[in-house]
Structures are given as C-alpha cells and as structure tokens.
C-alpha cells in the first residue's frame, strides 16, 4: 500500500554548477509542490525548477528580515501539513555546515518523515574546480573540514595544535573574516608560514576566482583581489598542484606572480 504520509526532502544543491546536481535532486525539484531555499542555491539551479512551483526564500537579504533557524524549522513543519512534496533545498550538502540535521531532528519531533539527498559539498567541488586534490599519496593523508565562523565578538576556539599538521589538508568554510586569526594561530601552533594556501571564491561557477598563495600571504592577497563570500580556504601542501592541475576556465582568475586579475 502506498505511504501517503507527507515527506520533507532535505536536498543538497551542490556548490553552484547546475550539472553537479544529483539525478535524485533533479527529480525531486521537478516533482516538488513547494521548495524552501536559501542564499547559496545558484540561480542556474533555480532556473531548472518548473514554473508554478511555490518558492519560499529563507536566506539573508541585506537590510531585510530573514528567517532564523527556529522560524525555518517551523515553516517546514507547517508546509508539510498542507503540501505533500516539500523540498528543503540547500547549497552544497545539507549535513555539512548546513543545519540539515537540525531540521531533520525538528521534523522527527513533529512526526514528519524526511529523506536526505546529499549534495556535493564545497570542499570537494571547489578544490576540484581549482585544480587542488584534497589528498595526494605521500603529501596529504587526511582532510579536515572546519568552520571558520565565530560568534560575534568571540575569537575562534579550535584545537590549533591538532590542526597544525603538514600531512593534513585544512578546509575552512565561512572563514574569510577570521583568516588573519587562522594564520596567526596555525603558525603559532607550528605550521610553516610558507605552507601553500588558497581561497576559492564562487567555486564551480563562471565567476569562480582562485587566489593561490601561502599561509603567510593569503590575507593580504585576498584583500588585493577583494575576495567576497562565498569563499573557501584551503591550506596544505596539496595547494602546490593548483597550477599543474588547473583544468577549469572561469571568466577570471588570479595570477600571483603577476599580482593582477587576469581576464580569460
Ligand atoms: C553555511 S556554509 C554551507 C556549506 C554547504 N552546506 C556545503 O556543503 O558546501 C557556507 C560556506 O560554504 C562555502 N561555500 C559554499 N559554496 C561555495 C562556493 N560555491 N564557493 C566557495 N565557497 C563556498 C563558503 O565557505 C561559505 O561561506
């Protein structure tokens, strides 16, 4: 017998390039009655959604009220009571710095079923499109995905000693504002200031920009390029592959040796 209970699908939209959407995510977007989405879902993916689908934006818009997490949780429950196919669409992967698990818990508490469709997270997608392998035999044997976001007026509280390992690739999400602190703490904990480091802005899109630098110089170099969010920080010896393995050609790129933005 068919299960007629409403279900909320927590769906990863991937990092931006619409061709990185999974087939399952694409199918659910075509079938959804209502889609709740936020800031990091790319326009190219929104353009794939059939006209007539009810769209609810819950991301931040400068100067305007946006829904906080409690309101978003409640909205999903309310929608599930009136619509049978609700999709909660999030940038990257919902369970990686995406609060997808909090939303899933809230749905369960309200006796609403959920399913989870993973998306390609920024760490793997942005590094791949920047020509940076996250691991490489003999160079990086592990990867750490770390949030660089700190609460207002509070410094980042991380175990810097455990992060300062030359055989580990460090990937910081939401780390632009705290980059100077990251650099200082990692060097203090023993990571060489000359460690290759990069920032990828708008990864996988036609607006992608890379800043390839060193841990020491990265804060200044991204300032020169006026790098903005969304941007991902990658620190580790694997960044030294960025020129050799650079296969993706977006509209613009940064060449450190010429210290200028190069229009392709
Ligand atoms: C709230 S987290 C969401 C991460 C998302 N759930 C994922 O799995 O990729 C937002 C951060 O992800 C990173 N990010 C997401 N998409 C990105 C992109 N296309 N280019 C660069 N960074 C991105 C940035 O560090 C951004 O500040």
Image: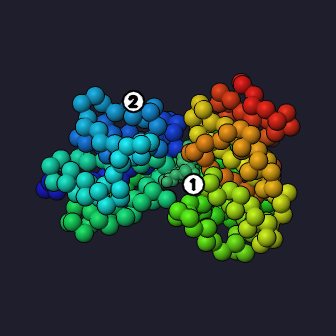
Tell me where residue 233 appears, x and y as whole percent. 66, 52
Camera-side mark, 2 or 1: 1
Of the image marks 2 and 1, the number of the one nearer the N terminus? 2
Which residue corresponds to the image point at 64% horizontal and 58% vertical from the top-left?
178
Q: 220 or 101: which is nearer to us?
A: 220
Secondary structure state at the residue bearing disc 2: loop
Is residue 178 toward the left or the right of residue 213 in the image? left
Which residue corresponds to the image point at 25% horizontal and 53% vertical from the top-left?
75
Q: Which residue is mark 1?
A: 174
Q: Quadrant of the C terminus?
A: top right
Is residue 196 toward the left or the right of residue 62 in the image? right
Is residue 256 toward the left or the right of residue 105 in the image? right
Tell me where residue 191 appears, x and y as whole percent. 80, 66
Residue 133: image tag? none
Mark 1 lies within 8 Å of ligand 1 (Cβ measured) = yes
Tell me where residue 247 appears, x and y as whole percent. 71, 35
Q: 214 or 125: which is nearer to us?
A: 214
Q: Which residue is mark 2?
A: 47
Quarter holding residue 57: top left
Classify 10 Å Cα crowding around label 1: few (below 14), some (14-19), many (20 and above): some
Classify 10 Å Cα crowding around label 2: few (below 14), some (14-19), many (20 and above): few
Which residue corresponds to the image point at 21% horizontal and 50% vertical from the top-left?
79
Tell me where residue 152 appears, x and y as whole percent. 53, 62
Secondary structure state at the residue bearing disc 1: loop
Which residue corresponds to the image point at 56% horizontal and 45% vertical from the top-left?
230
Disc 2/disc 1 C-alpha distance (Å): 26 Å
* 78 up-or-down from 251: above or below: below
Q: Is residue 207 visible?
A: yes
Q: Is residue 169 visible?
A: no
């Amino acid at each position: 017998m068919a299960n007629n209970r409403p279900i909320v699908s927590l769906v990863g939209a991937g990092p931006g390039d619409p061709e990185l959407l999974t087939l399952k995510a694409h199918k659910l977007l075509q079938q959804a009655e209502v889609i709740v989405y936020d800031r990091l879902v790319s326009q190219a993916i929104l353009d794939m959604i059939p006209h007539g689908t009810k769209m609810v934006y819950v991301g931040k818009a400068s100067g305007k009220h946006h829904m906080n997490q409690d309101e978003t949780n409640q909205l999903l429950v309310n929608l599930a009571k009136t619509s049978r196919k609700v999709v909660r669409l999030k940038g990257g992967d919902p369970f990686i710095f995406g609060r997808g698990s909090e939303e899933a818990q809230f749905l369960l508490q309200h006796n609403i079923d959920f399913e989870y469709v993973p998306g390609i997270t920024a760490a793997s997608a942005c590094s791949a499109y920047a020509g940076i392998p996250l691991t490489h035999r003999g160079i990086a044997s592990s990867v750490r995905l770390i949030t660089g976001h700190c609460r207002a007026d509070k410094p980042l509280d991380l175990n810097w000693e455990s992060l300062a390992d030359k055989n580990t690739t460090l990937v910081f999400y939401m780390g632009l504002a705290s980059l100077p602190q990251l650099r200082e703490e990692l060097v203090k904990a023993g990571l060489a200031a000359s460690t290759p480091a990069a920032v990828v802005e708008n990864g996988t899109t036609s607006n992608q920009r890379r800043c390839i630098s060193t841990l020491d110089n990265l804060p200044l170099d991204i300032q020169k390029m006026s790098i903005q969010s969304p941007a991902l920080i990658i620190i580790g010896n694997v960044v030294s592959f960025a020129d050799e393995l650079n296969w993706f050609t977006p509209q613009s790129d940064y060449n450190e040796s010429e210290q200028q933005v190069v229009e392709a």
